Image: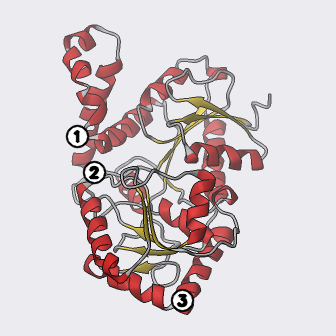
């Protein structure tokens, strides 16, 4: 076991089909590291050098707290890669921070085993603290964990969120989503799906826009596949790669107007499916509209899709630019390496 080079990296698995955990583990192996996957509700493995959390898709603070109680020589460096959204970015960060710390406190009360938690047991009974205001919880947990010394490195897939947090006093590293060979394959399949939607609808806004686009496209005989676990099941791993290889266009709609939704870009682009998106903020500066993806106002999404279905040469030009970006320059491994470099700095300064 090489404790000096930080080779043993524990990575939580949040859900049964956890593509992100699989991708992190795969890329860590390519770097010569030893990833150790564990279910998030299980104890964090012993004798590790790094606890590498991401998301989060459930409570992450208890993991950081528990490993912080280990003997100093056995305590891992804790790094977290945020891939989730923030509260409305128009709200001043000092307000978001204070509300986040309150929300984080409520979350800690809900799993603490003390008198206060028993007095406020109604929070656990109603499960209120577990399922509401999650974006505030993430913010509060990061602030609290950093202040307590439980969290050593915080990264974010969004450049915008990085700037907001860093300017607010919480150092945050920009680590965008990138391409990974685990995400794509050259299948040479017929592109018999015109438009593909993958993932949860997630919000009334996104669902309404998706339904509107589908309604406008259907009269034109456009072949659409909706993998939202309602109309059709979710698709993962190799099955998702196959669908992307069959799709001419992948539609991108965000849950809120300001969300970072570029994970969908790095799924579609390396499989040569054109990304047509509503207007998005520059969370990932590497993707340029008109070069790597097509952007259209919401009322124009269906019309834009029809245009690129009819104009294959223009579609192919953008597809190839996006493919080259995520298979050569914007790589998942590059971001992972940047985070691990910060881990080593934290280890040296401890």
Name which of mark 1 and mark 2 comes first in the sequence. Answer: 2
State left or right for residue 121 relative to residue 318: left
Tally the numbered discs: 3
In the picture, the quarter occupied by the N terminus is top right
176 lies above or below 128: below
Q: Residue at x 50, y 66 (%)?
A: 265
Check disc 2 and report its element: helix, strand or loop.
loop
State left or right for residue 91 relative to residue 313: left
Cβ atoms under marks 3 and 1 closer than 8 Å: no
Identify the image quadrant of residue 220: bottom left
Q: Which residue is mark 1?
A: 99
Q: Tag on residue 87? A: 2
Q: Residue at x 48, y 71 (%)?
A: 285
Check disc 1 and report its element: helix, strand or loop.
helix
Measured Cα–Cα span from mark 3 to mark 2: 39 Å
Name which of mark 3 and mark 1 comes first in the sequence. Answer: 1
The residue sitting at the top extreme is 115
Cβ atoms under marks 1 and 2 closer than 8 Å: yes
Name which of mark 3 and mark 2 comes first in the sequence. Answer: 2
Q: Tag on residue 158? A: none
Q: Which residue is mark 3?
A: 312
Measured Cα–Cα span from mark 1 to mark 2: 10 Å
Mark 2 surroundings: few (<14), some (14-19) or many (≥20) residues within 10 A: some
Looking at the rendered image, the disc whose residue lies closer to the viewer, 3 or 1, is: 3
Q: Position of residue 237 (x, y in %)?
A: 60, 52
161 lies above or below 75: below
Looking at the rendered image, the disc whose residue lies closer to the viewer, 1 or 2, is: 2
Measured Cα–Cα span from mark 3 to mark 1: 49 Å
281 lies above or below 44: below
Looking at the rendered image, the disc whose residue lies closer to the viewer, 3 or 2, is: 3
């Amino acid at each position: 076991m090489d404790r000096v080079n930080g080779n043993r990296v524990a990575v939580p698995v949040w859900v049964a089909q956890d593509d992100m955990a699989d991708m992190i583990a795969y890329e860590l192996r390519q770097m010569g590291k030893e990833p150790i996957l564990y279910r998030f509700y299980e104890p964090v493995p012993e004798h590790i050098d790094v606890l590498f959390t991401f998301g989060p898709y459930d409570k992450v603070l208890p993991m950081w707290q528990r490993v912080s109680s280990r003997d100093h020589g056995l305590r891992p460096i804790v790094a977290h890669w945020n891939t989730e959204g923030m509260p409305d970015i128009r709200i001043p960060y000092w307000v978001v921070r204070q509300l986040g710390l309150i929300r984080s406190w409520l979350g800690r009360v809900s799993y603490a085993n003390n008198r206060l938690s028993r007095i406020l047991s109604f929070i656990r009974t109603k499960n209120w603290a577990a399922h509401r205001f999650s974006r505030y919880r993430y913010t509060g947990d990061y602030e609290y964990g950093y202040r307590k010394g439980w969290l050593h490195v915080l990264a974010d897939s969004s450049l915008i969120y990085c700037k907001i947090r860093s300017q607010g006093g919480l150092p945050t590293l920009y680590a965008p989503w990138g391409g990974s060979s685990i995400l794509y394959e050259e299948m040479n399949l017929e592109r018999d799906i015109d438009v593909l939607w993958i993932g949860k609808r997630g919000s009334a806004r996104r669902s309404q826009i998706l339904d509107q686009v589908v309604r406008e496209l259907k009269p034109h005989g456009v072949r659409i596949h909706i993998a939202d676990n309602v109309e059709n099941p979710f698709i993962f791993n190799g099955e998702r790669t196959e669908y992307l290889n069959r799709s001419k266009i992948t539609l991108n709609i965000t849950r809120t107007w300001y969300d970072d939704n570029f994970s969908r870009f790095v799924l579609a682009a390396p499989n040569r499916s054109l990304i047509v998106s509503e207007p998005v903020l520059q969370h990932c500066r590497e993707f340029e509209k008109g070069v790597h993806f097509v952007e259209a106002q919401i009322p124009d999404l269906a019309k834009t899709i029809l245009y690129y279905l009819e104009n294959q040469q223009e579609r192919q030009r953008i597809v190839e630019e996006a493919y080259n970006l995520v298979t050569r320059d914007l790589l998942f491994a590059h971001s992972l390496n940047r985070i691990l470099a910060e881990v080593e700095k934290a280890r040296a300064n401890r």
